[in-house]
Image (spheres, grey):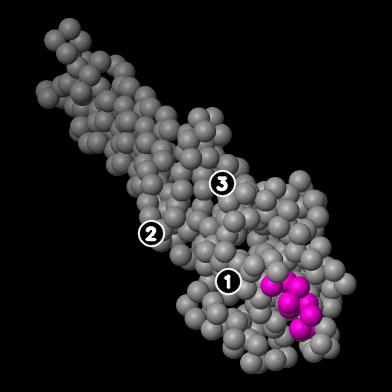
Amino acid sequence: MFIDELDLTLKAGNGAPGRVSFFPGKKAGPSGGNGGKGADLYIKASPQFSNLNSYLGKKIVSAENGRPGDTNQKFGLNGEDLYVNFPVGTFLTDINTGEELELSEENQVIFVCKGGKGGKGNAELKSSKNTAPQYAQKGLQGQKRHFQIVVKLIADFGLIGLPNAGKSSLLNELTNTDVKVASYPFTTLEPNLGVCNGKVIADIPGLIEGASTGKGLGIKFLRHIEKVSLLLHCIAADSPNIQEDYKVIMNELKNFSPELAKKKQIILLTKSDMVTEKELEKKTKELKKLKQKVIAVSILDSDSISQLKSSI
């Protein structure tokens, strides 16, 4: 399961209370130490994480509390700061304030929640008017923030197209991945990644007409191609209406994000082995009228795959 969106509360540690104690015997007087400070909480972009599965079922992630003050004016230990790991490409929106945080680079660290201050022990609270205080301060609560967290895959290229347009098979061929494929729509239920010549390709689950308004599976994954530099637009060569296939996808991109629809793209006429050479030539010319680069490919034709690899 690929979890790319959830709500999560992040909380810094609480400050610990100070101690109420007294020196024994002749050296009478307050000896209670201060409580330790609660741990601060940071978020970190970790290359070891690709999704939010680690936080599934969790409502809150909390940093360590400080330790209480001790006798003999010993201070309690501070909580150890917590670094919460998320994938590169994670966006966090504070549900209460609207503030947005973005983890866009590997090992990037952002301070999020401040730990609570530890309370003073009675040794530090004594004064000329009260030389033997019978009380100590409580520690302060650590800062708590509620976030909506969304992961957007960091990919160079995005494979898009209608369901069953051959995207997953093509990803397998280009990158030696092992994505499940079958001859029915929506085999791909989550985005898949592969690497070709050092470039990351994201296979986005098939879009359908109305995806940008919530139909099908595509709307959930369109955000994963918002930052790609090139779209690989797959259209099946055996489709009865390739122009309509193209329009459906482009309309959904425009409805989701006009900027996404403006991205550079190569049209891939997939499954080219499923039609005659004459029909393939006709459909290629038809798609070139859209003023986009068109490449006919088949996973059974190594030359066409090599041409595509060279183009990207």
Q: Residues within 10 Å of mark 1 (few under 14, many from 20)?
A: many
Depth order, front residue of 139/172: 172
Q: Name the image quarter holding the N terminus.
A: bottom right
Q: Earlier in the sequence, mark 3 or mark 1?
A: 3
Helix, strand or loop at label 3? It is: strand
* Residues in magenta, as a range: 280-288
Q: CA distance from mark 1 to mark 2?
A: 22 Å
Residue 149 is marked as 3
What's the residue at 32%, 31% (across, down)?
118
Instruction: Tell me residue 194's x, y (percent).
Output: 58, 75
Q: From the image, state whether disc 3 or disc 1 is nearer to you.
A: 1
Q: Is residue 24 left or right of residue 279?
A: left
Helix, strand or loop at label 2? It is: loop
Q: Is residue 255 left or right of residue 245?
A: left
Residue 201 is marked as 1
Q: Quadrant of residue 276?
A: bottom right
Depth order, front residue of 276/312: 276
Instruction: Tell me residue 291's x, y (percent).
Output: 64, 67
Q: Earlier in the sequence, mark 1 or mark 2?
A: 2
Depth order, front residue of 56/222: 222
Q: Is residue 68 left or right of residue 289?
A: left
Q: Which residue corresponds to mark 2?
A: 107
Q: Is 109 above or below relative to 67?
A: below
Q: From the image, state whether disc 1 or disc 2 is nearer to you.
A: 1
Helix, strand or loop at label 1? It is: strand
Q: Is 150 above or below relative to 132?
A: below
Q: Residues within 10 Å of mark 2 (few under 14, many from 20)?
A: some
Q: CA distance from mark 3 to mark 1?
A: 23 Å
